[in-house]
Every structure is written in structure tokens, then in C-alpha cells.
Amino acid sequence: MPTCPNCNSKVTELLKTWPIVEPGKNGEIVECVVGIYWCTKCKIKFPYVVGKHDLRLIEKRELVELHEKIKILDKVKQDLAEKVDQLEKEKIMAEGNLMLTKLEDKAENLKVEISLLREVKKEIEDMIDYLEHNLSLKTSGQSLESKMQY
Ligand SMILES: [Zn+2]
């Protein structure tokens, strides 16, 4: 906020503004916005720099080229964003497929295991059958023997 050069009080009464363009360093251009303020106490007008921008003179063709470049880069950026989205989707699908493949492998392994266990079970059953048969033959033989002892 500007202060009055006469009474040093803060002044908010802005009467008008206009831009001033001046050459700056390194071929830059400085645009100042100058305002005319009005001190209500002293009843005087004084100028004050409201804003300052560093500008650069640039050929129109160059500016158009820069805009084109920005457009192309925006398009590239958009394409990349779409690709990332697509890859994310593919990743999720691949993870799902991988899990499915793993489960299928597991199921296949379990099938093999079950068939093996069935074989083992059958063998055990056969063995039990055989043992029971032999045992019954033996006991009946024993009982026959014991009967014969009497
Ligand atoms: Zn004043």
C-alpha cells in the first residue's frame, strides 16, 4: 500500500492506473503499472508503481511455434496418461489371471494327489480284505483245531 510523500499516512484512494513499458536487462521488457493516488488528508495526487511484470519480446512466429509445442506435449501427456491407465487395467487383469493359473495348478496338483490317495486307499482296502480273509481262515482253522482238541 502506498504512503503519502507528504504526510506518510497510508493511502488507498486510487484515481487511475496505466501501464508503462520500459526496456529491462538482457533484452527483457519491464511493464510497470503506475497508479495515481489521492491523499485525502493533504489533498494531493502522487504517482505510485502498483505492479511490475517482466516481459520478453518474442517473434509472433516463435510464439506460435511454442504454442504448437505445448499442444503436442499436452497430447503426448494425455496419450501417456491413457497408456498408464491401460497398463494399470492390464496389470489388474494379469494379476487375476496369474491367481487363476495358480489356482488351476493347485487344483491339478490336488487332482493328482487325490488319485494317488485313491490308489493307496484301494491298496490298503485290498490289504485289509486279504488280512481279514486270512484272519478269518486262521481263526476258523484255530477254532476247528480247538474243537478237534475236545
Ligand atoms: Zn498526505
Image (tube, rainbow, N blue to C red):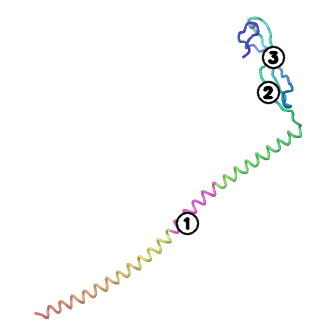
Left or right: residue 20 compared with residue 90: right
Residue highlighted by disc 2:
53
Circles 2 and 1, Cβ within 8 Å, touching? The answer is no
Mark 1 or mark 3, which is nearer the start of the sequence? 3
Residue highlighted by disc 1:
101
Q: Nearer the viewer, mark 2 or mark 1?
A: 2
Q: Quadrant of the N terminus?
A: top right
Marks 3 and 1 sit apart, C-alpha to C-alpha, by 76 Å
Residue positioned 85% across, 22% down in the render: 20
The magenta stretch spans residue 58: no
- In the displayed structure, 89 sits above or below 150; it is above
Residue positioned 71% across, 9% down in the render: 9
Residue highlighted by disc 3:
16
View extreme (bottom): residue: 148
Mark 3 or mark 2, which is nearer the start of the sequence? 3
Q: Which residues are magenta?
A: 88-105
Ligand 1, seen in the image, is in the quarter at top right
Secondary element under disc 3, as helix, strand or loop, is strand
